[in-house]
Amino acid sequence: MPYYEVPVDILENREKLAEWAKKALFASRNKSKRQKPTKAMEIY
């Protein structure tokens, strides 16, 4: 799983940092809920 650097302008602004962090957490939680197709799913 790749991780990205937080942009400097985000780090210097607490409000932007909080919003960026919320979006990052939401994205990581949604990604982990997705299932990879199994062999049985690939057949159909």
Image (tube, rainbow, N blue to C red):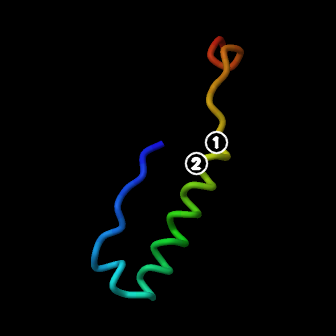
Q: Secondary structure at mark 1?
A: loop
Q: Is residue 39 above or below residue 18?
A: above
Label 1 crowd bin: few (<14), some (14–19), many (20+), radius 10 Å: few
- Residue at left offset 58%, top offset 63%: 26
Which residue extends farthest top?
A: 43
Q: Mark 1–mark 2 contact, CB under 8 Å? A: yes
The x, y position of residue 2, in whole percent, is 42, 45
Residue type at mark 2: give it: Lys
The x, y position of residue 43, in whole percent, is 65, 11
Q: Is residue 41 above or below residue 21?
A: above
Q: Is residue 16 left or right of residue 12?
A: right
Q: In the figure, residue 28 lies in which quadrant?
A: bottom right
Closer-to-camera residue (33/17): 17
Spatial separation of the CA atoms under disc 1 and disc 2: 6 Å
Q: Which residue is mark 1?
A: 34
Which residue extends farthest left?
A: 8
- Residue at left offset 62%, top offset 30%: 36
The x, y position of residue 37, in whole percent, is 63, 26
Residue type at mark 1: give it: Arg
Q: Is residue 21 left or right of residue 26?
A: left
Label 2 crowd bin: few (<14), some (14–19), many (20+), radius 10 Å: few
Closer-to-camera residue (8/24): 8
Q: Which residue is mark 2?
A: 31
Closer-to-camera residue (44/18): 18
Q: Is residue 34 above or below residue 15?
A: above
Q: In the figure, residue 38 lies in which quadrant?
A: top right
**Mark number, residue 44:** none
